[in-house]
């Protein structure tokens, strides 16, 4: 079953690939990546689902994996545990196949018995600069030793 929550999305078409973050809540989709926002709706049918996703550019930059900057995508997919996969096409470019993998991201507190340490930074222990040994052995990055 496709659960409500936050998902990491990996999407691809023959024109490129990318990643983003998606929220699924009560049949509504919202999300974004560095250049595009996503919105839309979905319906769950046991282990499968359908969705209509709109994609719109919010920042200039990399080209869309579809070509056009604004599209409406019809998707069908399957869910299995914390992952879901789907595919479909955009109405504006029906010859470009879109595929997406969603990975559920559960945000939660650490268990009560988890131990963590607080490390204090002591700036006096940081290196003060290059010493004579490092200056005399300077070499180009990635050059053999």
Image: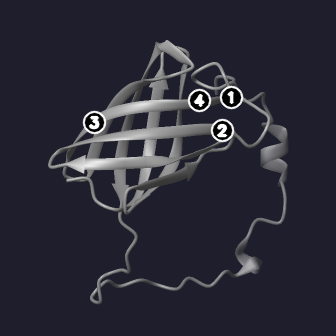
Q: Residue at x 40, y 70 (%)?
A: 107
Q: Dot 2: what SS? A: strand
Q: Residue at x 57, y 21 (%)?
A: 66
Compute the Cα span from label 2 to label 1: 6 Å
Q: Quadrant of residue 115?
A: bottom left
Q: Dot 4: what SS? A: strand
* Neighbours of disc 4 within 10 Å: few (<14), some (14-19), many (20+): many
- The image shows residue 116 at horizontal and vertical percentages of 41, 83
- In the depicted structure, whether residue 55 falls above or below residue 142: below
On the image, numbered disc 3 is attached to which residue? Answer: 77
Query: Between 125 and 9, which is closer to the camera in this rendering?
Result: 9
Quadrant containing the C terminus is: top right
- In the depicted structure, whether residue 145 falls above or below residue 134: above
Query: Between 80 and 58, which is closer to the camera in this rendering?
Result: 58
Residue 69's label in the rendered image is: 1
Q: Earlier in the sequence, mark 2 or mark 1?
A: 2
On the image, numbered disc 2 is attached to which residue? Answer: 56
Compute the Cα span from label 2 to label 4: 7 Å
Image side of residue 53 versus residue 106, left or right: right
- The image shows residue 56 at horizontal and vertical percentages of 66, 38
Q: Earlier in the sequence, mark 3 or mark 1?
A: 1
In front: mark 3 or mark 4?
4
Q: Earlier in the sequence, mark 3 or mark 2?
A: 2
On the image, numbered disc 4 is attached to which residue? Answer: 71
* Neighbours of disc 1 within 10 Å: few (<14), some (14-19), many (20+): some
Compute the Cα span from label 1 to label 4: 7 Å
Q: Residue at x 25, y 49 (%)?
A: 44
Compute the Cα span from label 3 to label 2: 22 Å
Is mark 2 in CB contact (under 8 Å) with mark 1? yes
């Amino acid at each position: 079953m496709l659960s409500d929550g936050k998902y990491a999305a990996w999407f691809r078409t023959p024109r490129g690939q990318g990643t983003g973050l998606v929220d699924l809540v009560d049949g509504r989709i919202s999300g974004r990546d560095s250049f595009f926002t996503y919105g839309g709706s979905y319906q769950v049918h046991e282990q499968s689902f359908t969705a209509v996703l709109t994609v719109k550019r919010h920042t200039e930059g990399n080209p869309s994996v579809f070509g056009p900057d604004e599209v409406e995508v019809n998707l069908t997919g399957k869910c299995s545990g914390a992952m879901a996969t789907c595919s479909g096409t955009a109405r504006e470019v029906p010859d470009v196949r879109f595929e997406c993998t969603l990975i559920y991201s559960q945000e939660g507190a650490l268990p009560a018995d988890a131990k963590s340490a607080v490390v204090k930074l002591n700036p006096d222990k940081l290196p003060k600069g290059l010493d004579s040994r490092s200056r005399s052995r300077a070499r180009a990055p990635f050059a053999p030793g």
